Amino acid sequence: MSIAVLDEEKLEELAEFFKALSHPVRLKIISILIEGKQCVKNLGELLGMSQPSVSQHLSILRSRGIVGWKREGSIICYYIKDDRVLKLYEMLIKEE
């Protein structure tokens, strides 16, 4: 089996991707969003956190392209944008 050696740019990109996922709250957000899109208010209630805290975590996930958002009237709803997250989450859950 040969292992592909990634260039520095790709390695940096992957490191940033994993950094964005490396917080328990962000992993909880991912687990909720896997079930379907949610607005910040709902996420805050489900997580027992303030909307500003949830928004800060969503901002990190959004900046890495992990989650996307869609405006529905005056509400912004978030969803999983990067399918790699779904695959990773599924692999990790299987390991338990």
Image (cartoon, rainbow, N blue to C red):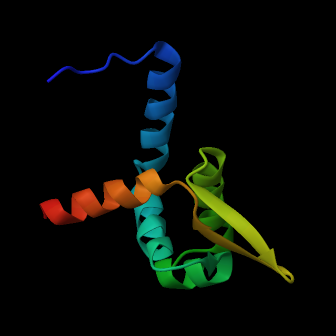
Q: Is residue 1 left or right of residue 21?
A: left
Please say if 17 is above or below 46: above
Question: At 68% across and 66% down in the image, what residue appears?
Answer: 52
Please say if 3 is above or below 54: above
Front residue of this view, candidates 44 and 27: 27
Question: At 86% across and 83% down in the image, what residue appears?
Answer: 73
Question: At 75% across and 70% down in the image, what residue appears?
Answer: 70
Please say if 6 is above or below 69: above
Query: In the image, residue 47 lies at what x, y percent?
Result: 48, 77
Q: Is residue 91 left or right of residue 48?
A: left
Query: In the image, residue 69 lies at what x, y percent?
Result: 70, 65
Q: Is residue 67 left or right of residue 96?
A: right
Query: In the image, residue 44 lies at what x, y percent?
Result: 58, 78
Instruction: Give the farthest residue toward the right.
Output: 73
- Looking at the image, how many numbered discs can be counted on the residues? 0
Q: Is residue 88 left or right of residue 21?
A: left
Q: Quadrant of residue 38?
A: bottom right
Front residue of this view, candidates 83 and 12: 83
Please say if 6 is above or below 73: above
Query: In the image, residue 20 lies at what x, y percent?
Result: 49, 46
Front residue of this view, candidates 38 and 54: 38
Q: Quadrant of residue 74?
A: bottom right
Question: At 33% across and 60% down in the image, what residue appears?
Answer: 89
Question: Which quadrant is the N terminus positioned in?
Answer: top left
Front residue of this view, candidates 31 and 9: 9
Question: Which quadrant is the C terminus positioned in?
Answer: bottom left
Instruction: Give the farthest residue toward the front.
Output: 1
